Amino acid sequence: MKRPQIPPRASKNYREIFVEELLALWSFLTNNWYYILPGIIALIILAYIVRPIPPSKIRMATGQPNSTFQVIGEQYQAFFKREGIELELIQTAGALENNQRLNRGEVDVAFSQGGLKIDDPDEKIRSLGSIAYQPLWLFYRGSELSQSESLNEFLNQRRVSINVQGSGTRTLAETILQLHRIDSDASNFFGLSTKDSIDALSKGKIDAMFLVAGIESKNLRQLLDTPGIHTFDFQLSDAYSKRRRYLHPIVLPKGSMEFNPVSPKFDVNMVATSVSILTTNNLHPAHQLLFLEAAREIDAHRLALFNGEIRFPAYTDQTVPESDVAQRFYKEGTPFLWGYTPYWLASLFDEIWFYVLAVGAILIPLIGFIPSYRKTHAELSIEECYSMLRRIEVQTLEAQQADALGELLGQIAHLKHRVWRLWVPSGIRPAYYDLRSAVLSVQADIKEKLAQSDQT
């Protein structure tokens, strides 16, 4: 009669294999801890260096109330809030003060503008790149001028606000005045804040005012909506950019502000500087990446009115060294895990993926070695037991006294207990059961010789 075939219990076999693999790994770890412990310490040090968990609060220097810096800062604040990060906005006089606060460590991040000299003796300040153009506007009261009016003629005998010390407007206005050989300390120039300048211009206390502002600025909108205030046409904008490489000539197209009535009535030549985000080496890489992603998202929804604009973020102002995170971002784009994992985890992987590959190159062959290791380790354990068994066997042959045989019987019992507790992987079981048989055989020999000794 043909014997029925019994299908193997696959699920049980899989469980046994899984348990066996875990035991093999545990055996490997416990027997090689002096190699593994330094590796764990190295990973802890690496985790400390890359700081995998970023802080939950950042301080950012922006600018004057209703300025471009303040409005854009609020957009970044909303973006960071979605990620659970509190972005505290610090109002300042402007870009120059922002840089000073950043250098003193009073803020973590700051808006800046191209062309400003950075006092950074420790070389700790880094750029995340430019996020927008900021045009220089010159608003004036009275009848609208022809496009042929030169800046020197225009400013002669006019009362003009060039903004307060520490502001980006003041710095850029003084740059343009220097190019025209105009003394900014002359009595017809005033250092009023943006708010005070708008108020004074509206009331006729001054005749004109400089303002560095993007289209997002509420101050700019207020001036553009005020009747009787016009925009000066910088006919030499191309020449400015040749003299100062951080300046960019742009054009405000005719009718770009209003179609009815048309405003402006003609194309307005302007000069712009770039708005940059500056930080230090201390800002967490995940936060740096968040700023760059925020810049990309905000730029995608930004109204681009000027001819000659580019898409942002971009590393256009190279007076400040680029951060390592920004370099990777502009070269490789958004990290692989961005959008699929928490932002800090995506940033962490972006930081350490090379090291992960390096560790994997070491561990993969090591993992492949574990099966042969566990077999070798088990064989060595069996051989050690055989050596002990052989010693007991030799001593049994030499022993004549009952006391000596009784001691050997205790040793064989101890060895038997040890053998019975051995971990035996698959492939070694025949040798293991041979060892058990040998132990039982020697134990039987000792008992037999002890019995004969008692009879005599």
Image (cartoon, helix red, strand yellow):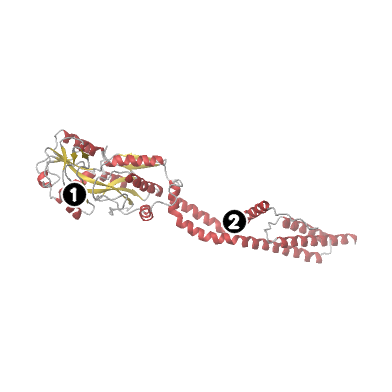
Binning the other alpha carbons within 10 Å of mark 1 as few (below 14), some (14 to 19) or many (20 upward) gives some
Q: Position of residue 450 (x, y in %)?
A: 85, 60
What distance separates the C-alpha of mark 2 from that of mark 1? 67 Å
Q: Is residue 87 visible?
A: no
> Under tag 1, what secondary structure?
helix
Looking at the image, residue 350 sits to the left or right of residue 218; the answer is right
What kind of residue is marked 1?
Answer: Thr
Mark 1, residue position: 175
Q: Residue furthest top?
A: 203
Q: Position of residue 90 (x, y in %)?
A: 31, 40
Q: Residue furthest front?
A: 1
Looking at the image, residue 244 sits to the left or right of residue 425; the answer is left
Q: Quadrant of the N terminus?
A: bottom right
What kind of residue is marked 2?
Answer: Leu
Looking at the image, residue 435 sits to the left or right of residue 114; the answer is right
CB-based contact (under 8 Å), mark 2 and mark 1: no
Mark 2, residue position: 29
Q: Position of residue 130 (x, y in %)?
A: 30, 49
Q: Considering only order in the chain, which callout, 1 or 2, is on the residue closer to the N terminus?
A: 2
Along the line of sight, the residue nearer the viewer: 45 or 297: 297
Up-down relation of residue 453 to residue 185 (above or below)? below
Q: Quadrant of the C terminus?
A: bottom right
Pair 2/1: label in front: 1
The quarter of the picture where residue 13 lies is: bottom right
Q: Is residue 178 visible?
A: yes
> Under tag 2, what secondary structure?
helix
Looking at the image, residue 65 sits to the left or right of residue 16; the answer is left
The quarter of the picture where residue 163 lies is: top left
The quarter of the picture where residue 159 lies is: top left
Q: Position of residue 23 (x, y in %)?
A: 64, 54
Along the line of sight, the residue nearer the viewer: 363 or 400: 363
